[in-house]
Amino acid sequence: MPTYQYRGRNAQGKAVTAQVESADESAAADLLLSRGIIPLELNEIKVKQSFSMALFQSRVSLEELQIFTRQMYSLTRSGIPILRAIAGLSETTHSHRMKQALDDISEQLTSGRPLSSAMNQHPDVFDSLFVSMIHVGENTGKLEDAFIQLSHYIEREQETRRRIKAAMRYPIFVLIAITIAMVILNIMVIPKFADMFSRFGADLP
């Protein structure tokens, strides 16, 4: 959940500065007002992730994202509430990163945040196209259509990647064969010819 640095005045009119955790800026302001603090300045604290954490953090694969979109399509089409669907999928996913994202999205949905806005807080899981299509689905009342379209898009992306990998196999095989041939020539063939020519030169008068 985001952390906000605030500056304000309490009920006695004294200046106060501290931090507060909340789903968004509006909720943070409401929380401060409920505590008798009038917020004058409110800024979200951006947590910088270390390079090592970013390097070794598990990523959500296309296969996992595909499963998620398919399941969300089925659940929304069946009339299951979004919050209940997200919470249920969080319990069944095998991806630790996806579970983290879905748990946070559930909290944000509980606070009244739209699904697209909550997903936008996890750009490493849901890219800009994904979030945009969910936003359109929310505005048009056809969220299930957005999920099935995203499912088709991810399928095409998977197929494109498979074709690229297949197309790269032959050139890579050729390069490996050439490299092995060059190593054999330099280690075994060329030294023998060099030794042969040196002996032949020594035998000449």
Image (cartoon, helix red, strand yellow):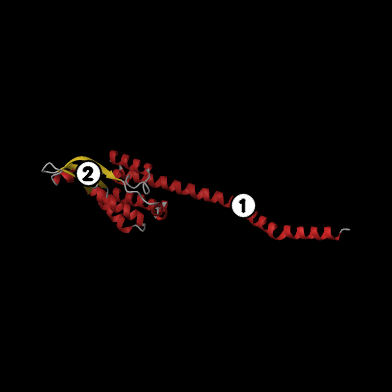
Q: Is residue 200 left or right of residue 73?
A: right
Q: Secondary structure at mark 2?
A: strand
Q: Is residue 114 visible?
A: no
Determine contact: label 1, label 2, CB under 8 Å: no
User: Which dot marks residue 130?
Assistant: none
Position of the C terminus, as image quadrant, is: bottom right
Residue 187 higher or lower than 14, as above or below: below
Which circle marks residue 6 in the picture? 2
Residue 24: percent from the left, percent from the top? 24, 44
Amino acid carrying mark 1 in the image: Leu
State the residue lying farthest toward the right.
205
Picture layout, residue 145 above or below residue 71: above
Amino acid type assigned to the residue bearing label 2 in the image: Tyr
**Which residue lies most toward the front here?**
14
Dot 2, how many residues are within 10 Å of its Cα: few (below 14), some (14-19), or many (20+)?
many
Q: Is residue 101 left or right of residue 181?
A: left
Mark 1 secondary-structure assignment: helix
Residue occupying image coordinates x 28% and y 51%:
104
- Asked if residue 197 lies left or right of residue 108, the reply is right
Label 1, label 2: how many angstroms apart (C-alpha)? 59 Å
Which residue in the structure is indicated by mark 1?
175
| Percent of width and height locating residue 48 | 35, 48
Q: Earlier in the sequence, mark 1 or mark 2?
A: 2
The answer to whether 110 is drawn above or below residue 184 in the figure is above
The mark lying in front, picked from 1 and 2, is 2
